[in-house]
Image: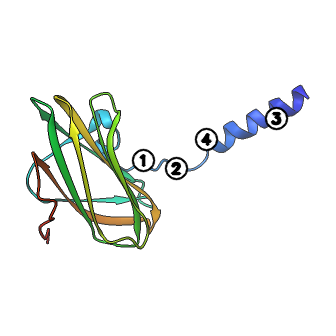
Amino acid sequence: MHVFLLYTGLLALSVVGCGGSLEAQSGPDAYRDQAAPAILNAWVPDAISRSEEDATDWKSFQVSTETPVTIQVKFGDPAVAARVSLHDIHGIPVAAKNKRKGDPAALLLAGTVPAGLNFIQIHCTGGSDASEYAIQIALGDSSGTPPRPF
C-alpha cells in the first residue's frame, strides 16, 4: 500500500511539473502584486491569451474612501470565456462576473470597494483561447449604460 501511495504521489508531482505556465509570457501584470496601475474613466485596450501564456491581467487603483466602482469590459472575440473580478487589498473578491463562450461581448460589473488599494483581474477561462479587450473603470455611481469603446 505504501508503494502505491508513493508512486501515486510521484506521478501527481510529475504531471503538475509538466507543461507551460498560463502566465509565462504575461509580462508585469500576471499576478496581483504586479498589477498595472489602472487608468480611470477611459477606455484602455489590452489582451488575454491562453495559447500565448498571458491568460491573466491585473489592474490596481486606489481610493480614499469606500467607493462604488463600475467596470465595463468589451471583448473583441465574443467566443472567449473570461472572468472579471474586483478585489480588495487582501485579494478578497468584492464582485465578479463570468462571460461564457457565446455570451454578449460586453460585460458590466459593479461593486463597492473599501478605502485603499484595490484590484481588478481579467482572466481567460476558455472558449476562444485569446481576445483583445477594452476596459473602462469608473469611480462613483454610474448609469450602467456602457458607452461604445471603439
What amino acid type should be assigned to the residue bearing mark 4? Gly
Determine contact: label 2, label 3, CB under 8 Å.
no
What amino acid type should be assigned to the residue bearing mark 3? Tyr
| Residue 20 marker | 2
| Among numbered discs 3 and 4, the one appearing first in the sequence | 3
- Point out the frontmost of discs 2 and 3: 3
| Residue 24 marker | 1
Mark 4 Cα-neighbour bin, 10 Å: few <14, some 14–19, many ≥20 = few
Q: Look at the numbered disc 4 and give the secondary structure of its residue.
A: helix
Q: Look at the numbered disc 1 and give the secondary structure of its residue.
A: loop
Quadrant location, the C terminus: bottom left
Q: Residue at x 38, y 70 (%)?
A: 103
Q: Nearer the viewer, residue 75 or 66?
A: 66
Q: Which residue is mark 4?
A: 17
Q: Look at the numbered disc 3 and give the secondary structure of its residue.
A: helix
Label 4, label 2: how far apart the Cα atoms are? 9 Å
Determine contact: label 1, label 2, CB under 8 Å.
yes
What amino acid type should be assigned to the residue bearing mark 2? Gly
Q: Where is residue 86 shown, x and y percent of the image? A: 29, 43
Q: Horizontal placement of 95 versus 65: left or right?
A: right
Mark 3 Cα-neighbour bin, 10 Å: few <14, some 14–19, many ≥20 = few
| Among numbered discs 3 and 1, the one appearing first in the sequence | 3
- Point out the frontmost of discs 3 and 1: 3
Label 2, label 3: how far apart the Cα atoms are? 24 Å
Marker count (numbered): 4
Q: Considering only vertical position in the picture, is 10 above or below 123?
A: above
Q: Which residue is mark 3?
A: 7
What amino acid type should be assigned to the residue bearing mark 1? Ala
